[in-house]
Image (cartoon, rainbow, N blue to C red):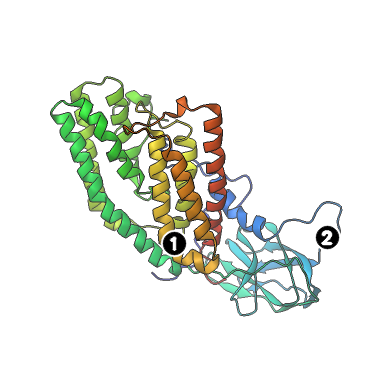
Amino acid sequence: MPERTPSPPAERPSPSPGHSPSLSPRPGPRRLRAALLGLLMLGTATLLGSAPPGGHAHPPGGKLQVDTTSCGTPPTRLPAGRLSFSVTNNSKVFVTVYLISPDGSLAYAEIPWLGPAKTLPLDTTLTGGQYAVRCVFSSGPVATSRPLQLDGTATDAVAGYRPMSDKELTGPVNAYRAYVSAALPKLLAAAQTLDADVARGDLNAARTDWLPAHLDYERLGAAYNSFGDYDDALNGMANGLPQGVDTPSWTGFFALEYGLWHGWSTDRVRALSQQLVTDAGNLIDDFPSEDTDPGNLPLRAHEILENALQFQLGGIADYGSGTTLATLEANIQGTEEVLGTIAPVVRELDGGLVDRLNSQLAAYESEVASYRATDGSWTAPAKLSTAQRQKLDADLGALLEQLAILPNLLTPRNHA
């Protein structure tokens, strides 16, 4: 795919501490949790430096005034160690500001999406050597400052990271799309089996076949609106609907779950199972034309289980079957699939991260699977003891901390 200049924050939220992306009025189990993306974007500042402690002298650096023709004028020489530049955007567009090596092969700090007329600190700790400041404007221009020479050494200097172009995620995106394309026919077949159960009036069989069909969908990793309106149609929850579970337009797996476990008539359930087959077939037809944003793939690797923490482990997505731990297991498997697609790129940037994540994912999947009985039934979250719930929460939280490294690590930094 062609290399793109950064999208303005109308498409990606700007990293202001108060930013909270609004949720859909019809949240499904894959909906972006408020402020997640803003926090991930802010993760760069957290990883690469923070403001100096109160009461300490302000580190050297100074003010940088940037616009579409200039990336400021840093001092020609400074001592190695802690640095802090106050960067003001004098342009009318957004700008991402990097502190880089002279050849641009490494970046050491960044401010993503600095808005017009806004000022933010560019902080880091560097050892002796030559550096520069680079500005990438959302309208296209790229400007680089004069060289900055740092004298001396700093034992706590940050390690530079290799800026990555979004083109490097083309292979992972293609691999993810191939995975989904291969899995969708299985989803359709499972939906057809479920519909056939209902068509002959065998709701007991339908209750049995509902779960494997639903898990086929949950393994796809449909975070970040990867399936557009089909995600709502196939897997939308009743939260936010005008009449809740009685809203006539409510369709998909959760509507079927509610109907099958709450005594709805066969005719009413059949309308839902038929629609499920139709929507699954339409998704198969439409998916080849759906775009997959490369920048969303690493976010998805974290967001699948972030959603699962809220909706599955918390039991919010239980509409009667008591199988949200089974869904959590499917979400782990979906995360493993997404991680597998991005693993080659991740290994180049952080050699040990993939192995750590694979180990943690396998361990947590084994822990969750321990709540499946020999007859295939699952413990409902409401029946977990306090100690069991706390351990599942804590272990998933620890896993999410590691997965949260991926979005920042793989953020496309074109022209950095």
- Residue lying farthest to the front in this orientation: 374
Judged left or right of residue 4, residue 72 is: right
Residue type for callout 2: His
Residue type for callout 1: Ile
Place of residue 234 in the rendered image (x, y in percent of width and height, measured from the top left):
30, 40
Judged left or right of residue 368, residue 276 is: left
Which numbered dot is residue 297?
none
Place of residue 137 in the rendered image (x, y in percent of width and height, measured from the top left):
57, 66
Label 2, label 1: how many angstroms apart (C-alpha)? Answer: 40 Å
Of pointers 2 and 1, the one earlier in the residue sequence: 2
Place of residue 91 in the rendered image (x, y in percent of width and height, measured from the top left):
62, 64
Residue at the image position 28 percent from the left and 51 percent from the top: 183
> Residue 24 sits in which quadrant?
top left
Judged left or right of residue 69, residue 247 is: left
Q: Residues within 10 Å of mark 2 (few under 14, many from 20)?
A: some
Q: Which residue is mark 2?
A: 58
Front-most of residues 407 and 206: 206
Residue at the image position 38 percent from the left and 43 percent from the top: 330
Q: Residues within 10 Å of mark 1 (few under 14, many from 20)?
A: many
Q: Secondary structure at mark 2?
A: loop
> Residue 255 sits in which quadrant?
top left
Please identify, in this view, whether the residue under mark 2 or under mark 1 is nearer the observer.
1
Q: Which residue is mark 1?
A: 342
Residue at the image position 36 percent from the left and 58 percent from the top: 176
Q: Secondary structure at mark 1?
A: helix
Residue at the image position 29 percent from the left and 27 percent from the top: 248
Front-most of residues 160 and 291: 160
Residue 287 shows in this picture? no
- Residue 198 vertical placement versus 54 (above, below): above
